[in-house]
Amino acid sequence: MNLLSRSVTERPLPIWRRPLIIVGLVLGIWAPFKVAWEKHIDEEIMQVRYHGAELNRDLRDQLSQNAMIGLLGGFRGVIADLIWLAVTDAWTEQDWYAAEKNIELATTLQPRFVPFWELGGWHLAWNASVDARNDPLLPDQEERKRREQFWIQRGKKIFERGLEANPETFSMYRQLADLYDQKLDDPAGAADYYLLASEMPDSPLFLERFPAYKWEQAGMDERAYDHWKMLWNRHLDSPDERPIAKDKIEEHIRKLEKKLNVPTEKRVFPKPSSSPSLKP
Amino acid sequence: MRSLDRIFIIARNTLTEAMRQRVLNILLLFSLVAIASAFLFDDLTLESEEFKFIKDFSLGAMSVFGLLMALMGTAALLPTELENRTVYTILAKPVHRAEFLLGKFLGILVLLGVAVGLMSLVFAVVLFLKEQWVLGPMQAQLAEVRAEAGPNSVEVIQHLEAQMAEVKEVARDPNVIQAILLIYAKQAFTASIAMFISTFASSMIFTVATTFMIYLIGHLQSVARDEWLSRPDGNWVTSIFLGILVLIIPDMNTYNLVDEILAGSDVYWSDTGQILALTVVRIAIFLGLSVIIFNEREL
Amino acid sequence: MPDSAESSPTSTPAVEIRSLTKKYQLPWKRRVLIAVNNLDLTVQPGEVFGLLGPNGSGKSTTMKMLLGLIRPTSGTAKVFGLPADSIKARARMGLLPENPYFYKFLNGDETLRFFGKLCGLKGAALDKKVDELIKLVNLENGRDRPLGAYSKGMLQRIGLAQALVHEPELLLLDEPTAGVDPIGSREIRDLIYRLRDMGKTVIFCSHLLEQVQEVSDRVAIMSLGNKMVEGPLDELLVQQDTVQLAFDDLPPEKREEAKEALEKLGAKHVRLERPRLSLEQLFLKAVEHERVHPEGERPTNEAKE
């Protein structure tokens, strides 16, 4: 029979048996549960995506970001990867503005993939800045330094946003600490970030000594001494193995106790040298 | 139960049809994508990037191919049966229409399951090969350092071992299982929408186009929902339009947890379980409605 | 079937159709197409019943209503006393659809197994039934061949075999010989004889009169949804008011003489013609009103809503 022709019913079905009515009814009853359930799941996904971090961006911004992320449904990773390949291209061609734009895009799509933030910030703060300092086309040393600082600040911004999106991993703290240390000549700032990094559960053990090194470098000897003492007490019962490096801790405590003239009774190591923990 | 037997028989027949039409050739295409993604991007800065690329591209391909199968396969089910009149021969036997429909759908579900399962297997093999490929030089270096036993060897060994452990961790991320389950759930749900539409559609094109529209709009539904729920005092025309959209169109972003898994977020089985449960309810509703409409349809 | 013993064949007709009507709303028009109009039909168990009519006369629609594939607009159809759209009724009916297409990807054996399993057969019983049917329809050579490679006649035969797989008491055959060559067509006719000998009730639709005439006990002729004629072939084909003279050929002038002689004796409407297949005559007469109108003004079974 012609599919287009409808059959005529002389004795229509009673109203509760008509398919359209039933379909409408089922969808209608399901609708409120559906909306509530879907909203709940959506909130949980947001929780996973931002890890509960409140992003201080205005609602409009966040709305359009969520819309974009939604539209890519299922293929967000692939798109982010393709954009990331463009970052690598821009890097080899030293087109730093293009690199920055694509880093922003990739990290917007996948804010929870930490390497995008790490490498992105590194490209800008290290590669782009050095490139600017050595740029023969720039007129004078002054301008080159200004440009260098500009890219360092852009890289710092990437790290800071990465930290916002991933506050529970040590990596972004460490990146910022390295930046303060190596690019901003601010060992005290670096020390603060190293301290935060070392307090993260996924931090490698050796990082715990970094704040003290940097405080010493910044001339904040007392702060450094306190930190070394804290480390000594923390590992009092541990065997002297490499990542802990008790020998190094002891060495620094002895040095600082001497330098700061700590009264003998308050010293960790009242006697000079020949401690059993010091290897011959 | 007789009824279940008949559903299984029809499902098996549907599966046989797909197999004999070599639907699973799509696996070759998938393998190509997976292998290419593993060995084309081998000069990236970090190993974790390389593994991310394999996962993104392979699971992306799994989504696309599975979705195509779910959409085209399901949309073609009823039209081919009607066009070839095979439906008359089956329904002339003591078989309920619901059994026929459910059997057909079960066939598609199993087909999708087989396809996703085999693709996962290829994916696992590629991941394993890549892992060995990356670990190989590290192991060689480790052996070298151990043999040397130089002054810094303890630190180097520790560093290498940590690096190798990290590679194994990204390569053997168990969360990928959740991602694959969610990808399958999304395909199954899309198939049930196509099934529902095909019970009243007059052509396969209509079914494919409409299902795809629902699929696309479904990805924007959550934006519409937030707008609708947060502004009860807005323009009433917009409000009604958004309301209908929100109440009827399913939220396809429910399955976006896959993206979070691939991006490396910690995902809990409870979240995945909840999404799978919602999927089961969704499919049950759409199948129920399909049966209601198909029962009244003139063949 | 165990329960057929309880009801005597005379009290429960195999098929009982009462005032069955099917109307379709034509698309984009305020017209309805009456596919089947107020049809009454009774077929007794064991009968071979031919349903005749030109294309579009409502034969297939009637068949589909009998199988519950479409819902009647009004009226009822019962099969062995059961509502036609019930599963129980379908368990006692077998259908050979018009131009049967089965799954091309299955071979003959798999096709029969598939339908057998659908009807609840398993294991040894299924094996036995499949062997039996393949032998019955003489399809040994098609057993392992996919149906995509079947000829028209083979398709009709496998179609008949699957219709018989659940041992139905009533068989509906829709154009069983359409597109089949004369030899294949003969084979199918022989099969229908065998089915009748097995005690099955057979209803078949056709527009090939010769065949219907050969095998049917009773026929009905439909046109534009209406039943025009119904009855046992013997009765229908004997024209009570006409006597036909047959003779070996005379020269033309002698024929005129013979005609005049008969008219002299008082015979009216004397016609000289070669004997025709009588059912064809009957058929043409029954559907005559469809044909006398010039092209473009054909009456249709459309009606204003």
Image (cartoon, rainbow, N blue to C red):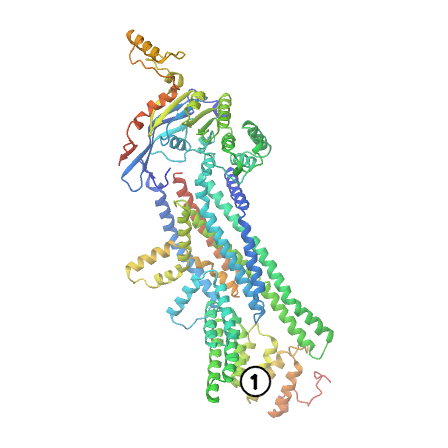
Q: Does C253 appear above or below A38?
A: above
Q: Does B175 appear above or below B2?
A: below
In the foreground, C305 or B8: C305
Does residue A167 appear in the picture of this structure? no
- Disc 1 sits on a residue from what chain? A
Displayed quadrant of residue B136: bottom right
Disc count in the image?
1
Label 1, residues with CA under 10 Å away: few <14, some 14-19, many ≥20: many
Displayed quadrant of residue C255: top left
Can you give x and y, in whole percent of width and height, for residue A80 in the image?
A: 49, 66
Quickly name the residue at label 1.
Answer: A214
Per the image, label 1 sits on a secondary structure element best described as helix
Q: Does B202 appear above or below B185?
A: above
At 30% from the left edge and 60% from the top edge, which residue is drawn?
Answer: B238
Most extreme residue toward the top is C265
Quarter that holds the C terminus of chain C: top left
Tell me the kind of residue under disc 1.
Answer: Lys
In the foreground, C207 or A10: C207
Does residue B61 appear in the picture of this structure? yes
Can you give x and y, in whole percent of width and height, for residue A257 in the image?
A: 62, 90
In the foreground, A226 or A14: A14
Can you give x and y, in whole percent of width and height, for residue C231 in the image?
A: 37, 20
Q: Is residue C134 left or right of residue C299?
A: right
Most extreme residue toward the left is C304
Displayed quadrant of residue C73: top left
Q: Is residue C56 left or right of residue B20?
A: left
Can you give x and y, in whole percent of width and height, for residue A162 in the image?
A: 49, 73
